[in-house]
Image (cartoon, rainbow, N blue to C red):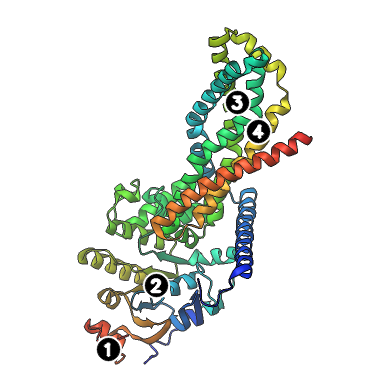
């Protein structure tokens, strides 16, 4: 059953989006919307198209059909240059943080400021150190390289890089995967804190139910390329869809 | 074989047809990539820090290997002229033959092959690893065009660095020949240098430098292309690295023949 989780105007919307890889239909007429200022967690088993859903929205992959609307504007077929300009208000935390190995921590955080916004290196460094403080990292890490950081610290740096431009839309791809429960909890708290303080819309993909409950207002369940359940996070425990039940109880009996 | 697949002559024709179409498609992809890369290289915005970094990696750090190769090649060429050329008194024109061989052919080709081994593979593995770890995607989400930030600086650096390296290789190669000629036929270095300068025409050097610029572009293009198209994690990056080096070497030798035949008619 799909419910209407909120009445906020849509910040981001997928309309009948399809995406194939050869014979494998990954997104099969996906319909989903995220209200302005809401935080949505997209749940689903591995290989169900969660990452593809985000990559299509970001234009990192082209949809075969359908449309993606950002603030009501169809961004599906934007020219590359226009699409890059539209990224100015978007931040993304990648699953493996995707930090640039050859750049120091502050250069990673200030990458957009230096290379896209034309900010001087000195100012970018100052702003990067401010952003690092927001994710509870001290200035002593600014000159280190990603390889010198733990997985949790890399995620924090990735988060600092995502929020440094004060985005209105944030994406999180498996933000707690590979982290111990304490570090994962700290990352979840940071995500909640930053999303609230920036007042932005957030879309997270995860199969970590604890994380989803903590960071999301709304939850959508993706299965075989379609949304099979969409509702408020608080309603998750009362959902009657078998896949959602399986996620909640951790028992996959009868779910294909 | 697939059920219902054509056999015999039809099957052979179908296989040749598929291979031809595949080849044409691959050439089209590389040409498209090259066109976009050139456009990114010649139009702003440029990233000077990246370009300088690539000049350092491609040019400056390749000096030792290119220099050593050039010295040994010049020395070996002089030795060959001494030991094999005495049948027709070629040892008397050792400086001229070494200079001509190095400037027109061996300097550009060997410097390019050394660079293909050192640089094309490094470019492919670096860009391939960045793709595998979503760093290229991250760059796009940070409003930065990877073609301008990653590809263009490498194309610019390789195309400009290789002629400069070749010029240095020419000088070191001639020096290698000069040392061997001093050792074997006691030819004074000053006479060797005078003979070399008197004999060489500017076109001998210029044609080698033009070739080098083309070879440099090929190295940058193959390194970036194979890195950008790497798929399948670490194994894919390994394949891309090998493909970048092999395709660069083959294209360099093919381009060398084409350019030499064009220059021969000028």
Q: CA distance from mark 1 to mark 4?
A: 70 Å
Q: Is residue A72 visible?
A: no
Q: Quick check: do tags 1 and 4 share a chain?
A: no
A86 on left or right of A147: right
Q: CA distance from mark 3 to mark 2?
A: 63 Å
Judged from the image, the secondary structure of the residue bearing numbered disc 1 is loop
Q: Quick check: do tags 2 and 4 share a chain?
A: no
Q: Are marks 2 and 4 in contact (CB under 8 Å)?
A: no
Q: Chain of mark 1?
A: A
The residue at which mark 2 appears reads as: A199
Q: Are marks 1 and 4 in contact (CB under 8 Å)?
A: no
- Of the numbered discs 2 and 1, the one sitting upstream in the chain is 2
Q: Which residue: 71% across, 16% down?
A: B198
Please determine whether, in this image, residue B78 is positioned above or below residue A156: above
Q: Is residue B160 visible?
A: yes
The residue at which mark 1 appears reads as: A254
Judged from the image, the secondary structure of the residue bearing numbered disc 2 is loop
Q: Which residue: 42% across, 52% down?
A: B238
Q: CA distance from mark 3 to mark 4?
A: 10 Å
Q: Are marks 2 and 1 in contact (CB under 8 Å)?
A: no
The residue at which mark 3 appears reads as: B170
Q: Are marks 3 and 2 in contact (CB under 8 Å)?
A: no
Q: Callout 3 environment at 10 Å: few (<14), some (14 to 19), or many (20+)?
A: many
Judged from the image, the secondary structure of the residue bearing numbered disc 4 is helix
* Quadrant of the snapshot with the C terminus of chain B: top right
Judged from the image, the secondary structure of the residue bearing numbered disc 3 is helix
């Amino acid at each position: 059953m799909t419910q209407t989780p909120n009445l906020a105007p849509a910040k981001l919307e997928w309309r009948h989006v399809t995406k194939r890889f050869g014979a494998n239909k990954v997104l099969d007429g996906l319909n989903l919307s995220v209200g302005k200022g809401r935080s949505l967690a997209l749940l689903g088993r591995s290989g169900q198209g969660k990452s593809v859903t985000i990559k299509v929205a970001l234009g990192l992959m082209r949809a075969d059909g359908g449309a993606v609307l950002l603030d009501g504007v169809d961004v599906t077929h934007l020219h590359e240059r226009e699409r890059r300009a539209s990224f100015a208000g978007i931040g993304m935390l990648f699953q493996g943080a995707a930090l640039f190995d050859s750049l120091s921590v502050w250069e990673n955080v200030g990458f957009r400021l230096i290379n896209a916004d034309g900010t001087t290196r000195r100012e970018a460094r100052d702003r990067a150190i401010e952003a690092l403080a927001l994710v509870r990292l001290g200035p002593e890490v600014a000159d280190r390289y990603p390889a010198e950081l733990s997985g949790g610290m890399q995620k924090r740096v990735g988060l600092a890089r995502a929020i440094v431009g004060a985005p209105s839309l944030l994406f999180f791809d498996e933000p707690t995967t590979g982290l111990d429960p304490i570090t994962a909890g700290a990352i979840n708290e940071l995500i909640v804190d930053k999303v609230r303080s920036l007042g932005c819309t957030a879309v997270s993909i995860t199969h970590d139910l604890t994380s989803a409950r903590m960071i999301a207002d709304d939850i959508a369940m993706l299965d075989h390329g379609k949304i099979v359940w969409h509702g408020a996070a608080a309603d998750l425990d009362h959902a009657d869809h078998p896949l959602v039940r399986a996620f909640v109880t951790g028992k996959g009996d009868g779910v294909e | 074989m697939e059920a219902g697949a054509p056999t015999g002559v039809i099957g052979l024709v179908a296989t040749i047809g598929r291979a031809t179409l595949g080849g044409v498609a691959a050439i089209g992809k590389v040409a498209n990539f090259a066109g976009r890369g050139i456009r990114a290289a010649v139009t702003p915005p440029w990233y000077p820090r990246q370009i300088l970094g690539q000049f350092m990696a491609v040019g400056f750090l390749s000096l030792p290997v290119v220099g050593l190769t050039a010295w040994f090649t010049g020395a070996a060429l002089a030795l060959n002229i001494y030991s094999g050329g005495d049948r027709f008194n070629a040892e008397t024109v050792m400086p001229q033959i070494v200079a001509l061989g190095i400037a027109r052919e061996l300097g550009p080709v060997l410097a390019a092959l050394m660079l293909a081994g050192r640089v094309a593979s490094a470019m492919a593995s670096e860009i391939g690893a960045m793709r595998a770890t979503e760093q290229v995607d991250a760059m796009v989400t940070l409003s930065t065009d990877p073609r301008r930030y990653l590809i263009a600086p490498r194309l610019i650096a390789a195309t400009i660095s290789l002629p400069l390296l070749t010029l240095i290789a020419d000088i070191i190669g001639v020096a290698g020949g000069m040392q061997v000629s001093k050792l074997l036929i006691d030819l004074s270095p000053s006479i060797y240098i005078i003979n070399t300068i008197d004999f060489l025409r500017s076109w001998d050097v210029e044609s080698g430098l033009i070739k080098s610029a083309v070879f440099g572009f090929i190295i940058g293009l193959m390194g970036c292309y194979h890195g950008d198209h790497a798929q399948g994690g670490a194994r894919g990056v390994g394949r891309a690295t090998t493909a970048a080096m092999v395709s660069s070497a083959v294209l360099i030798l093919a381009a060398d023949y084409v350019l030499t035949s064009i220059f021969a008619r000028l």
